[in-house]
Structure formats: structure tokens, C-alpha cells
Image (spheres, rainbow, N blue to C red):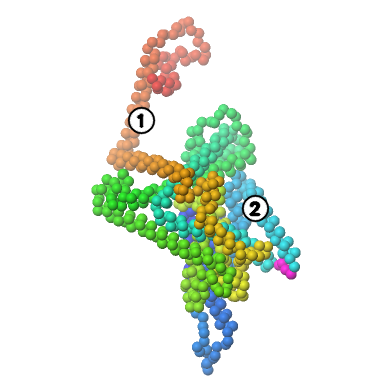
Amino acid sequence: MSLGPLIGEVVITFVLAACLLYRYGNWFKHHIIVTVSVLVAWYFSFLIIFVLPLDVSSTVYRQCMQTLNASTEPPETKNGSSSDSPSCHVPWSYVPDEVFPDLWRVVYWTSQFLTWLILPLMQSYTKAGDFTVKGKLRSALIDNAIYYSTYLFICCVLFVYLVLKPGLDVDGSKLKVIASSASNTWGLFLLVLLLGHALVEVPRSLWRASSYGHSLSKAYFRTAKLSSERSESEEAVDDVLEHLQAVTLSVGPGHYLHRHLETIMQKIPAEIRDRMGRRPPADGSVPDEPTEKSLVRLHKQVKKALQMQHRTEAQWVILLDKVIALEDASRFFSNHARPNSWWPPSQRNQKINHIYKAKLNFVCIDWYWRGKEYFLKAAAVCAGTLSAAIIWSEVTFFVKDPVLSIFARIVNLAKSNYDYFTIELISTLVIAYLCYCAYSTVFKVRVLNFYYLAGHHGTDEYSLIFSGMMLCRLTPPMCLNFLGLIHMDSHVIKTRILETHYTQVMGHMDVIGIVSDGFNIYFPTVLLLLCAATYFSLGSRLLSALGFHQFIGGEDEMTADLIDEGRDLVKREKRRRQRTEETSARRRDFHERFGTSLGIRRMRNDDRVRRSEELESQESARAVLLRDVEPLDYSSAELHPEDETLRLPERTRFNQLPRGLFDDV
């Protein structure tokens, strides 16, 4: 009996959540409150996933002890000890009974408080355009008014329903059960939609990813679509900058709104500010006098436009790197008999000079790409098998006699052999796979195409908060669903059993009483229908018919056109990158050969020579034009004050002519 395994998993889970947040977030740029809130949301959600198997194994041991104590008393020997009595093996990761209830209460209610109250307010707070904390909080409350009023209306309806229901006394404990049941209802319905798509799409996407030709065509298709999104985001930024430039003409340094304008300008990156400074004014019209409300609206538009541009740029860089890697793989397999033929032209001569190294690289690359292909196929087969087992168990987990759920049978078999490690391993594997399916589907759908988790610290605060909300909302009902799959929920199998501490704290896999009738019928039915629709790509075909182009294997003309467009865009981007690399290489070679000081002196001399040549050409052009000019009669000319320049010497007068006037001569 030791807390070592539990403490180890708690520490490892925290390190995992912190590393993932460091990869996707930006600790030095994002607000500390946002970082801490998202870290707590991710950490508590992952903690449920990895600690619940320990609770399951401990519950199996407690069930064994309960059965043993309920059986007949074992015979006693003369010295008072029992002989040949049945016993229950203590799990290697057994945790005392008083630990899990306190842990689950802290984890569950903290995550629910975050996902239903704190994180929605923070999400609206981050996109608010006000310039004070009070104004941002007011805007966040107004933005969430409809959101909260909807839930308040539902809670009032449920409360009235429970009060009017005969034979039911409502107290504090029952209100908590009702609240958790309502949360589970929302989570289970969303979980059905996500799993109905992901349980089919995840194995299929892994299998198709092993085919580099299919992956390359799909990447070209995504490149074409992302290019249009990128252009739209740049146009949105240009429109906002045009409006902001017009405001800067009206708000000077002494204006009472100038500090708000400076706050907006600080949000804009330096290169975009320079581009805005080089833009000419849109027209000669005088802009309207800005107000604080208009600046708040403009601030919100600036943040939204920059966020969309940042998201599309991050996606663009990641997608192009992926496409280039896939092109290398495709070129490698098409020219596998010639090791040097698939290398880029800039590296080919170097590889030819090192034949042995080239052959060694060829073998390593061959192992990498073929190993990746076989690994993806093996992962697709494993994921497909696991998906089939989950679908079958989801459809049949309401059936107790005989036990049809595959995972319930596995747990019962391991329980009879006191194999606690297998129970924990199966539990962790199934819960982790369910979480991967659900969470990956959330960010593939990308509600309004606004949320995206980008690596290398490229995720914005809004998407991080959204991810924390979804983790906290989906993880508890998903784990309750898993407990129903292994028949450890008494409300599912309709049998009184000793349940896990997790179920005792968070409630059962119940839905609210209004929709509970027939839940075991329409839950499996909806799941099967969604899986069938995903298998036949009915959703993608419907979206394509409505004008939202989806990749359906190049079967239609529009998909083929987008693939060709994406291929051309990738070629153009590769040429641009190659020119940039060649320019950098030439500059680096020049500095290495001549040194930095010599290079600077040579650049200055070149600028001086070019400037003198321009002056000489201008002087010669002026001399040609002035050769046939008749002299002015100063005696007869009456000079006005504005014609004082005529009294200047001839060379001085013409030196005051605008530069560039004779550049085309």
C-alpha cells in the first residue's frame, strides 16, 4: 500500500501538460492568467485520464474484498488464524480509500468551474476591444449574456420540473446531482457527434497517410484552399490598416484619444506598421471625428484581423513544409534506383563528390520513408481494430446477460486472475484513444475556422482557452462512458455494485430525466448512423454540393482543379525560398571572403560612385537642355517677390530644380 504510483502519475501528468502548453502556447507573450488557467484546465483533464485506471484497479480490489466479506466466515485454526482461506491480492498501485474522493472533488469541480464560468469570460475578455479592465469585463459579460441566459433558462425549466414532480424532495446534494447530470447530458450528446466521425475517420486517415501519392494530392488541395484564406486574411488586415491610417490623421499627439490609438498601434507588428507608413492616403476625403466607441470597435477588428492572419501564416508555413517533405518522398520512391537523382540541385554536386556518404544517406532515407509507411499502416490496423471494438461495445454495453461488451469481458477476465496491470493498461489505452478521437475532431472541424493549435509557440490565446474549455467539458462524460463500457456503472447495468470513487463524486452516466427514456436505444442508433455517414463521406459530399469544397479523392473536376492550383503555388513558393537561400549564401560567402569591414567600405564606395554618376548625368542633361536657351532681359523684366529666385546665379537656380526632373533624358 503506497502512494508512489499515484504521486508519480500526478507529477508526470503535470510535466506533460506543461510541455504541451509550452509547445503550443507562448509563456512570454500571453497573459499570465491565461497561461495558468489553460494549464490548470489541461492538467486536470489529463489527470482524470491517467489516474482513473488506478481508481478502477482499486475498485476491483474493493469489490473482491466486499465479496469475500459477504461470503461465509473462513474456518479458524487453533491459534486463531485461518487456513486455506480465499484471499484478494492487493494491487501494486493500490491507493487508500480516503485519497481518491478528495482528489476527484478538487479536480471535477475546479474543471467545471473553469469550463462554465471562468474560461468563457476569459475568452470574451481576450477579444474585447476596450482599453480598461473594467470595460473589458463589461464587454465580456455582455458577450456572454445570451450564453448564460440560455443555461439559466434551462436550469429554471429543470428546477420547475423537479419541484412539480411528485415524490421528489430537492436539497443541496440532489441539486449537485442534477447539475452534474445536465453537464453529462451536454457532454454525451457532443461526444456522440465527435466519436461518430472520428472512430471511422482516424483509422482511414492513418491508412491513407501511408500512401504518399494520396497524401500529396490532399496536401495540394489544402494548399489551394489555404491560399485563398490567406489572401482573405491579408485583405482584412489591409482594410483595417486603411481605416486605422485614416484615424491617425484625425488623432494627433495632443488629442484626448491619442493614448488609445497608441494602444492599438502597439498590437500591430513592426513590419506591418512600416507598411502602413508607406501607404498613401486612400483619398482626399476628411474622415469623421473618431470617438472612444469607434476606437473600441476598431481595436476589436484589429485584434481579430491580426489573429486570423497569424493563424493562416502559421498554417501556411507548416503545410508547405509538409508538402515539400511529401514531394521529396514521392521523388525518392520514383527514383529509388538512383540515389543522387532526387536530391535538390543545390546539394547534388556536394553529394556526388561524396558517393559513399550519398549511398549511406540513401539507405537511411529509404529506411525512414518505408518504415514510416509500414508504421502508419500498422497504426491504421490497430486503430481500426480498436474503433470496431469501441463501436461494438458502445452499441451493446447496456446488455448485461450475456456480457457483449468486449472491454467488459477483458476486465472481467483480468479481474478473475487478479491481473491489475492489464486492467490499468486497457483502461489507459481505451480512454486515451477516445480522447484522441474526440479532441482531434474538434480541431479538424474548426468551428468557423477560427480555432487552431499551432506548434512552435504559434497558438493564440483565444484558441488555447477554447481548447481548455473543450477538454474540461468532454473528459468527465467520456470517462463515465468508459466506465459504462466495462460495466462499472450501476445505472447502466441496473445492478447494485461497489462503484469507483470517480462515479461516487461525479455521478453516473445519466442524462436528465426528460430525455432519459429510451436513451439506451437512440444513443447506439445515432452512433451507428454517424459512423455509416462518415464511412461513405456523406458529409463531405453534402458540403461540396453546397459550395464548401471538400477533398473527396479527386473524383470531381473542382477537386482536380484545386490540386493543380496547389501544385503551382508550391512550385512558386519553392522558387521564392530558393532565391532567398541563394541570396543569403552569396552574402555569407562575400563576408567570409572579404570580411565585414571591407564589405561595408565597398558598399559605401559603390553608393558614392553611383551617386556621383547620377549627378553627372543630371548636369549633362541640364547642359543639353540649356544650350539653346535665349538669355533673359533683366532690365525690362519686373520682378515680383515670388520671382526672387530669378536673381540667383544660373547654376544655383537650376540646382533648385526638382531632383529626378531630367532622369528620363
Give the camera-side residue of 192 and 46.
192
The residue located at (69%, 56%) in the rendering is 153
Give the camera-side residue of 334 and 287.
334
Q: Within 10 Å of the Cα at label 1, are there few (<14), some (14-19), or many (20+) other Cα atoms?
A: few
Give the camera-side residue of 301 and 609.
301
Q: Within 10 Å of the Cα at label 2, are there few (<14), some (14-19), or many (20+) other Cα atoms?
A: few
Q: Main secondary structure of the magenta part?
A: loop
Q: Is residue 272 visible?
A: yes
Q: Is residue 134 left or right of residue 223?
A: right
Name the spot of residue 250 as percent of width and height, x first: 59, 33
> Which mark sits nearer the N-terminus, 2 or 1?
2
- Residue range in magenta is 167-171
The amino acid type found where label 2 is placed reads Tyr
The residue located at (47%, 73%) in the rendering is 421
The amino acid type found where label 1 is placed reads Asp
Q: Relative to 650, does residue 443 appear above or below in the rendering?
A: below
The part of the image, by quadrant, that contains residue 177 is bottom right
The residue at which mark 1 appears reads as 607
Give the camera-side residue of 605 and 429.
429
Q: Is residue 501 visible?
A: no
The residue at which mark 2 appears reads as 147
The residue located at (52%, 38%) in the rendering is 235
Residue 262 part of the magenta-drawn span = no
